[in-house]
Image (cartoon, helix red, strand yellow):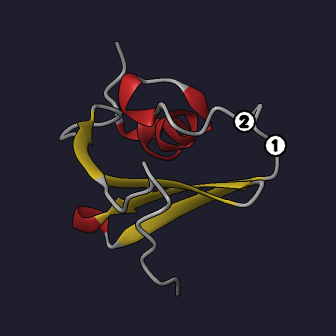
Amino acid sequence: MFRADPTLYGEALGSWAWDAEVCKPPVHVVERQGDIGSTRLLSLLLPGRNASIVIIANTEKADLFNSYSKKGPGYEVLRAWFGSMLPSK
């Protein structure tokens, strides 16, 4: 894809793993965030469910990078997808 370039300070590959408490038991999420040019990308991999969610935006106004803190479109998609699996209160 791209060659490593040490002049691109602060650029790195990485991902976060966390449990989204949007259903019982919580959904294990592996999250990868990134920017390519003016395009923002959020990948949510759900290894225990053999599924993935990818959200792409062409504006910096889209707050894609706060799913783990229960904010933004990524978390809302997880909640919409799995929220119906929560027991009624």
Residue 62 disc label: 2
Q: Is residue 17 above or below residue 6?
A: above
Q: Residues within 10 Å of mark 1 (few under 14, many from 20)?
A: few
Q: Is residue 12 left or right of residue 73?
A: left
* Quarter where residue 77 is shown: top right
Q: Is residue 42 above or below residue 7?
A: above
The residue singled out by tag 1 in the image is: 59
Residue drawn at x 42%, y 77% as measured from the top left:
4
Estimate the spatial distance between the alpha carbons at disc 2 and disc 1, rounded to whole Å.
6 Å
Residue drawn at x 34%, y 12% as measured from the top left:
89
Residue drawn at x 22%, y 64% as measured from the top left:
48
Q: Residues within 10 Å of mark 2 (few under 14, many from 20)?
A: few
Q: Position of residue 36 (x, y in %)?
A: 66, 63
Q: Amino acid at mark 2?
A: Ala
Q: Looking at the picture, tell me which residue is in the foreground, 21 or 32.
A: 32
| Residue at the front extreme, as displayed | 7
Does the rendering let one see residue 27?
no
Q: Is residue 89 left or right of residue 38?
A: left
Does the rendering let one see residue 88?
yes
Q: Position of residue 21 (x, y in %)?
A: 28, 31
Q: Amino acid at mark 1?
A: Thr
| Residue at the left extreme, as displayed | 25
Determine the secondary structure under disc 1: loop
Total numbered badges shown on the rendered structure: 2
